[in-house]
Amino acid sequence: MKKINVMKKGYILIIFLLGVIISLSIGKAIMQNTLSTSGIYVGEVQEQINEYETQNTILSEQLLTASSLTNIMEKAEASGFTRENTLMVLNASRPLAIKP
């Protein structure tokens, strides 16, 4: 009779361990499925980040081009500003106020 109880306990232990193994396997499969779909989302976000970085680089280059002195000079000449190098020198000082 004792031999039968020991065998029943061993049988119950084996069934319990198999249940734990099956439960953990199912849990692992569910977690891997969740992580794989999260990986797709992370990939899409990374592509968007790369697009924004490219746009940022292009806009930075355009800003540097637009703010260069040569470009500003060309736009000023097109607007009618002239580039004359004439200097005006005053030799005699004028009085600020005339005494009566």
Image (cartoon, rainbow, N blue to C red):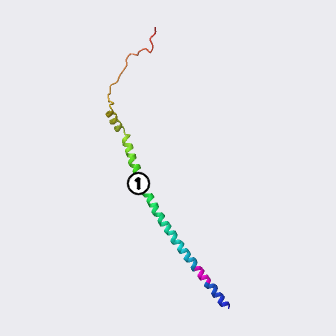
**Three-letter amino acid code at the position of disc 1:** Glu
Instruction: Judge the density around disc 1: few (<14), some (14-19), many (≥20) Cα neighbours within 10 Å.
Output: few
Q: Residue 91 appears at what percent x and percent y?
A: 37, 17
| Picture layout, residue 83 above or below residue 11 | above
For the point 55% across and 77% down, the residue is: 22
Asked if 13 appears above or below 87 in the picture, the reply is below
Name the image quarter holding the N terminus: bottom right
Does the magenta stretch mainly form a helix, a strand or a loop?
helix
User: x, y percentage for residue 90?
Assistant: 37, 19
Q: What stretch is highlighted in magenta?
A: 12-17
Q: In this image, 82 relative to 6: left or right?
A: left
Q: Name the residue under label 1.
A: 51
From the viewer's perspective, tell me whether residue 14 is left or right of residue 65: right
7 vs 84, left or right, is right
User: Residue drawn 65% across and 90% down?
Assistant: 4
Q: Position of residue 65 (x, y in %)?
A: 36, 42
Residue at image location 44% in from the left, 61% down from the top: 43
Q: Nearer the viewer, residue 69 or 27?
A: 27
Residue located 31% across and 34% down the image: 78
Q: Position of residue 61 (x, y in %)?
A: 38, 46
Query: Which element is circle 1 on?
Result: helix
